[in-house]
Amino acid sequence: MRRVLTPSTAAAVVAALAVLCVALTAGAAAAPDAGAAHAASVGDSAASDPVSSASADECDPGDGTELVGCWNGTHYEESVDFNETGGLNETQLAALTDLTMARVEHVRQRPFREDVPVETVSRSEYANDTASGGNESEAFRRWNDQVWRALFVVGDGENANDEIDSVLGGAVSGFYSPAEDRIVIVVPDGESAEVDPSTLAHELLHAMQDQYHDLTDPRYVGVTQDGDLAVNGIVEGEAVHVEERYAARCADNWTCVEPPESGGGGGGGFSGNIGILQTVLQPYGDGALYVRDLVDEGGWAAVNETMNDPPNSTAEVIHRNPDYETSEVDFEDAATGGWETYGDQGVDGAETAGEASMFVMFWYQSAGVQFDGAYEYPILDPDRSVGGNFNILLETDAQLQTRGTYNYAHPVTDGWAGDELYPYRNGDRDGYVWATEWQTEADAEAFRDAYVRMLNAHGDGIYEDGTVYAIGDESDFPGAYGVERDGTSVTITHAPSPEGVLELRPDADLAFPDADGTDGADGSGDGDGTDGGSDDANGTDGGDGGNGSDGTDGSDGTDGSDGDSTENSAPGFGVAAALVALVAALGLSARRSS
C-alpha cells in the first residue's frame, strides 16, 4: 500500500544546522498568481482543462462537485472564525478542511470529485504502526543493508531499515492513504490536533491526484530506489507547487490559519541519518521546480500528462529534462566461490541507486561538519574545504517560498546514464557489485575519481590503480574494494577480503594488495592516483585529521579557494520552519520482495 507521507523535519533540521540562511530566505521568488490562466490543454479534457472558479454567490451547500473553488458551501475567499490555540475540535477541523479543499480547487483549477476524510493520530501510534520491525524478510533486510553500505551512508555496524524508520518515524506530520481515501494528521502525544494549513493543502492535493489518476496504480511505485524517487518527483512536486501557490495567496490576500508553533526550536535538532533524509527530500524541492517548468511551458495539461507517464529517473527531475537519455547497463553475473545474488529482491536482485542517491553519497562525506554520524571529507570537490563541499547542497539555481531548496546536480554525478547494484551473499559474508554507466568517458572518469577519493578518505593507504584496495576494521566500511573503468562504464566490487573481490569479479584486471594491506603504497605516494596528488591519503585537502577542526584545510572559511567566505559555517538548510516534504512509504529501498 502506498502512503504519501509528510515528514515534519523543518524545526529539527533548522535547529541542527543553525547559523546562516545563504540567500534561501532573501530573494525567494513569490509564487505566481494561483488564478492565472495557462496554455491550452491537451489530452483528456476531463483531467486537463483548467476550470474557472465559482463566485461566492454561486457557492451553496449541496451544489455538487462541478463547481471549482467551492466545497460544502464554503467559498475559497471565505475564512474560518477560529484560531488553533489549544487545538481543533472535530467541527473546526471539518470547517478548515472544507475551506482548504475549496482553496486547493481554486489553485489547481479543477474540482474534487468526492469528500476527503481528515483524521488525527498520536505520534507514538503512528511510529508503532509504521515501523518496519519484523515485517521485512531477513533476506530483504540483508540485501537492503548492502545497498546503503554501497552508498557509504549506513555503516557496517548499523541496520539500514532501522535507520530509515528512525528518520521517518519521528518526522512525519501527516499522510494521505490512497487505499483508504483519507488523510491522517500526526500530532504530538497528549496534545490536541493542530494542523499546519500547508500540510493540509499538500495532502489534499494528493487526494485530488488520487481521484484523477489513482495513486494505487503500480506506475506510482517505482521498482527501484531511483525509480521511486523519480515518480515522487511528479507526485510530490505537484503537491509542493500547489503548496507554493497556496502560501503566496495566504501572504497576499487570503486570511489563513497560522501554522502551529514548531516544537523543534531551541535544542535537540535532527538526530537521524542526514544522508537518508537528504535522499528522501530530493523529489520535493527538485520536483516542485520540475513541475513549475511544466506549468510554465504547457499549463496544467503538461502536469497531467506527466502524472500519466511519470519520470523514470531522478536525473529527469534534477535536470528538469523529460527527455533525459539513459543507457543499458552491461552486467553479467560471473561470481565464483559460492557467491549468490538475491534473485527475489529488487529487479532480478539489483537495485538502481540513480543520480540523486549518488550525489548524496558523496555529499554525505562532508555532512559531519554539522551532523553527528556523518563524515568530514571533501569528496565532491577536493579543491574546496569540507564546509565548502557541504555547501554544494545549497548552491541552487532557483528557490522555493515554502521550504529550503537543495542542489543535487554536480559534475561528479550529473553524467549518470544508468546503474545496477547487485548485493551478494556467501554464508555469513556480504558483498556487492555495482555496475554504472555514464554519458561520456569524462563523466565516468569524474565519478571514478570521486569514488577513489572516498575510499582514500575512509582507508589508511593511498589507492593504487589496478589494485584491490583494503580498508581496515576500524572504519564504518571495512573490507576490500575494486574499482574499474572501461570507457563509459565504472564497476565497483566490494567483499570482506581481496580474495572475495576477485571471486565476485574473476575477470577483473585487479591485483592483490601487498601483504601489509597498503595496496603497494608505503604512505609516501603523491596522491590518490586520480588527480596528480591534489589530496593527501585521506582526501582532506592536506588537513591533519580530515575534520577541518584546526582550520588547516580552510575550516575557518578563509581558504580562498573559491571565494566562499562561509565555507565551513554550515548554513541553514531552510527558509524557516517550512521544510515539510512528503515521502512514499514504499520508497527509499524499503521495498518488499517481488
Image (cartoon, rainbow, N blue to C red):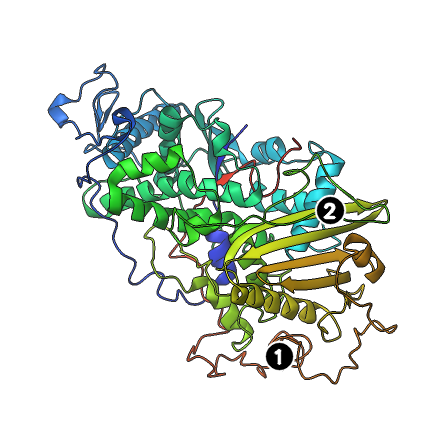
Q: Nearer the viewer, mark 2 or mark 1?
A: 2
Q: Is residue 431 left or right of residue 406?
A: right
- Residue to which mark 1 is pinned: 535
Task: State how many labels appear.
Answer: 2
**Crowding at mark 2 (Cα within 10 Å: few <14, some 14-19, many 20+):** few
**Crowding at mark 1 (Cα within 10 Å: few <14, some 14-19, many 20+):** many
State the image quarter where residue 546 is shown: bottom right
Q: Position of residue 8 (x, y in %)?
A: 47, 45
Give yes or no for contact between labels 2 and 1 (Cβ–Cβ under 8 Å). Answer: no
Q: Position of residue 314 (x, y in %)?
A: 48, 49
Kindly report the distance in space between the C-alpha atoms of the residues bearing marks 2 and 1.
Answer: 35 Å
State the image quarter where residue 543 is shown: bottom right
Instruction: Please name the amino acid that badge 2 sits on.
Output: Asp
Residue at the outermost left position: 57
Q: Position of residue 466 (x, y in %)?
A: 73, 69
Q: Is residue 429 left or right of residue 116?
A: right
Instruction: Please name the amino acid that badge 1 sits on.
Output: Asp
In which quadrant is the C terminus drawn? top right
**Residue 442 in sight from this viewpoint:** yes
Q: Would you place residue 287 above or below residue 44 in this image?
A: below
Can you tell which mark lies on residue 333?
2
Q: Secondary structure at mark 2?
A: loop
Q: Would you place residue 315 above or below residue 381 in this image?
A: above
Q: Is residue 131 left or right of residue 311?
A: right
Q: Would you place residue 240 above or below residue 568 in this image?
A: above
Q: Residue at x 17, y 30 (%)?
A: 52
Q: Residue at x 27, y 37 (%)?
A: 300
